[in-house]
Image: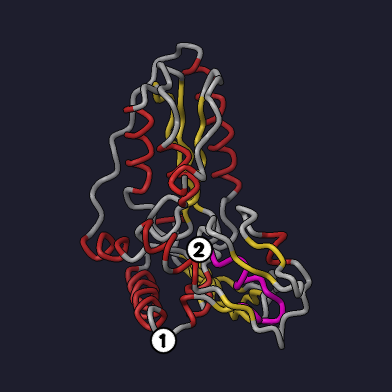
Amino acid sequence: MESEKWAPARCSRLSVGIGSPVYYFHLPLNVSHYVQYLPDLGRIPAFVFIVHGSLRIDTANWLRQTLERKGAREVGYFHCRGEAHVLPLLREGYLFSPDRPSERELFEAKNFGAAVAARAAGAPYVRPPLEPKPPLIYRLERLLARRWLMEHFYSRLFRVDSSKCTACGLCMEICPTGNITRDPRGFPQWDRRCLVCLSCEMKCPEAAITSALDRFFPGALLRLVFRYDVRRWVREGKLKYTRVIHRRGAISRLATKHVNRSEDGFRGISRQHSEAI
């Protein structure tokens, strides 16, 4: 069945760990599907690890609560930042959370792993509270990334310009779900396992791929929403960012990096050489 395409195999592990990025204030579809179809976990120790480039808001709550409903025994919850390689944000000229995770965060992640092992073996654990409900604007934005829209609308709007595409296969190589294959002419074609991560479009060296983001509808609405988010985050000053130019699959950093007090203990602008990722 279509709804079971991400279903896991029978669970026979001694513990369960779910690590996930945050996509558009949601879990990626393959992660949520996988967890949804897990069998009864029978008090198996479980931990959750979230990586986010902008705001994580309450994304982990559903994951933690679902694992609990399936009988898992939570032994850890950890979150840290990672670079926000999000195409619509890059097109606005912003790379949020550059150079993350930091050395400190990697050290904390290592300690988290050791603590999880100890708790799974019986060490005491005080379960952190759930994340608070996010502001209304982010709950409204999350409606634009509902599962049905992702699976049945956005994922069907990918196109390739055959006059630009060199059939290099990079999009197929980097697709996290193996959703992209070659058509009879050798050009990419998209199946139904798309996460709408936009990595294929973001990394294409010939700018040959377009998506929902590039269409008048729903692209104009989506671009407006992401532009609002960028301006709000910059104005609020809670997220570290670097100005960038995204062109033909490459991210070129400009000369300044903006740092905020809440993340790194100081506020300032440091010099940084231009580089391509």
* Residues rendered magenta in the picture: 197-209
Quarter of the C terminus within the rendering? bottom right
Residue 266, position in %: x, y?
A: 45, 60
> Can see residue 255?
no
Q: Which residue is mark 1?
A: 216
**Which residue lies at the image location 43% right of the left edge and 50% below the top edge?**
27
Q: Is residue 169 left or right of 134 when viewed as pictured?
A: right
**237 vs 94, nearest the viewer:** 94
Quarter assignment of residue 25: bottom left
Residue 125, position in %: x, y?
A: 38, 20
Q: Given the image, on which type of amino acid does mark 2 rest? A: Val
**Which residue lies at the image location 55% right of the left edge and 20% below the top edge?**
12
Q: Is residue 161 left or right of 143 when viewed as pictured?
A: right
Farthest residue to the left: give it. Answer: 136
2 or 1: tag closer to the N-terminus: 2
Residue 257, position in %: x, y?
A: 54, 71
Which color scheme is applied?
secondary structure
Q: Is residue 90 left or right of 70 when viewed as pictured?
A: right
Q: Residue 118 — which label?
A: none
**Which residue lies at the image location 71% right of the left edge and 77% below the top edge?**
205
> Which secondary structure lies at badge 1?
loop
Magenta segment includes 204: yes
**124 vs 158, nearest the viewer:** 158
Q: Which residue is mark 2?
A: 196
Q: Is residue 201 left or right of 220 when viewed as pictured?
A: right
Q: Residues within 10 Å of mark 2 (few under 14, many from 20)?
A: many
**9 vs 20, nearest the viewer:** 9
- Between the residue at mark 2 and the residue at mark 1, the CA separation in whole angstroms equals 18 Å
Q: Given the image, on which type of amino acid does mark 1 rest? A: Phe
Farthest residue to the top: give it. Answer: 122
> Which secondary structure lies at badge 2?
loop
Magenta segment includes 144: no
